[in-house]
Image (spheres, helix red, strand yellow):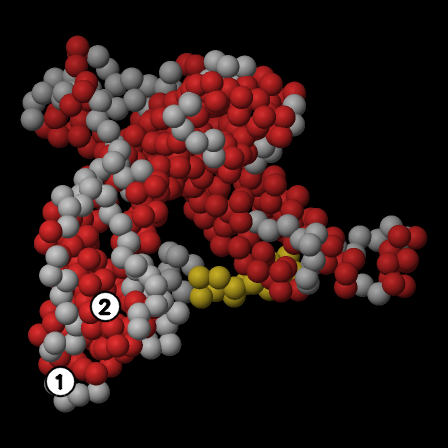
Amino acid sequence: MKKALEFHEELKYAVECRRDFLETEILPKLKDMFKNYKSAFQSIVNLMLNKALIKEDPYKHDQKISEISIPPLTQIMENEKAVQLGSRLSFYDTQLEHITSYYVFSVDYMNTDRIRLLKKFVNYIHWKMVAETSQNPTTRSLASILAKIRNGNDQLAISIINTSINQLATFQKVIEDYLKDIENFQKEAYKLKVRDRVMINSGIYKYASENSTEETLSVMRKKFNETMVEEKFLSDLIKEILEEEFSTESEELRQDLLFKLTQNAVKKEKKEDKKIKVKPPSLNILMNAALTVCSASSQLKSLSEKINTNVSVLSEANISPLMKILSKIFKVDTSKNVVFEIEYIDDITGSRKVEKIDKSDFLRKIQKIQAEISPHKLKAEVTAIKTSEGRENYLSDFIDNADMKLKILTYQTGGIDKYIKKSAESGQLKGFVIENNALKNIIIKSKQQAQEYINLKEEYRQFKALGIEDEENKAAPGIKQQELQ
């Protein structure tokens, strides 16, 4: 339960970080993108109006909008095309005017229902394929009218159409991506609310440890109906919570979730952090970065087990029946001396690498890295160093070296994964995606923590250069003793 509460606090902070990022970065860009979309759309509509190919709705400016709605999607008769299409495009343009001028671009306002509505709205016309064969009636009618311009001699008009359609297809995709970002946040905000109001202090954690997922889900539904009557019970999202909290892969899922929420996020500043703190950074920050690296041990163990399992499956599949019998009689391990020939792109050099990897050597390499990043070994060696400078240098080197080895390992295991999957079709083969993603997240997180220490140290150096004394004349703090126990 203690670990669950710690994760809960981290998740709260991560969700707030993501909220700030959406409010300050994504939502202003989304609004600007809708303005660009409206401008490109009006270029096409104005061109068709000027050429009298459609008729504008005379009641367009009388419409009162309280919520976005979608124009009709029914078939348009050929003899009514100019009027009906003109009416639909006028209605659409009015909705766009409301979005760009009056719509509330905030996380709280843009709930999942409004996001789904905006997705449907922005996809009302299929800009990626404005063709007379389109299954979308409005897109098909629009294409047939634009064909009259494209088949003419007005090169400027043709250029306006082609440019505007290409822009609209691009804007449409970007808007969809931004809406997806907000929708994903709303899902995680919903899950956090369920954790807050249904799970914490309700006995669910204890119950889940003794009962099945379905039984736990049933108990949660009952508790949900008591405490969250204003919300819908979303089974898929509740099941995601149970996976993140109680499954065998919960640690990896939690790390992935925190990484996704804090990736590129704007960190909230606490009020007390706004004051200048003239004190040297604590080595605990570097120690935490090193311990983050040590957490990769479980992923390395899982990788070793999966490689052995996959090689055994492949060996069984590829040897003859006679050899299978002989290997059992003489207890010969047919998976020995397996060599993987892999290729991958090295992110550091950007070059394509081809490499032959002996299975046994590779597993020994993983074991060696596991031994090197043992938290017990780390704490013992840091404790043996007497000076803060020596500890800082040791921890910095430890993080850099381990991160580099883990990064190379992810390239190689990714290559082995592809090699194995090409070699045989079997449901028994186990992929390395979860482990590799977890390792990548560990590398990123440890580097972020180490960089935080470097930034604080540089800030402290600049303060000292200005002649500002240490806070309360205290010496630079070292690593707290509890970190080494």
Residue 367, numbered label: none
- Residue that mark 2 sits on: 85
Specify the amino acid type for callout 1.
Gln
Asked if 281 appears above or below 117 in the picture, the reply is above
Q: Does 371 appear above or below 366?
A: above
Relative height, residue 76 to residue 120 (above, below)? below
Question: In the figure, residue 345 lies in which quadrant?
Answer: bottom left
**Residue 252 spot, x, y in % from top left:** 51, 37
Q: CA distance from mark 2 to mark 1?
A: 24 Å
The mark that comes first in sequence, 2 or 1, is 2
Indicate the position of residue 272 as horizontal and vertical percent values. Answer: 19, 18
Whether residue 294 can be seen here: no
Q: Quadrant of residue 285?
A: top left
Q: Which residue is mark 1?
A: 155
Nearest to the eye among marks 2 and 1: give it: 2
Viewer-side residue, 138 vs 330: 138
User: Residue at 21% across / 58% down in the picture?
Assistant: 92
Count residues near mark 2 (Cα–Cα under 10 Å), then give few for <14, some for 14-19, many for 20+.
Answer: many
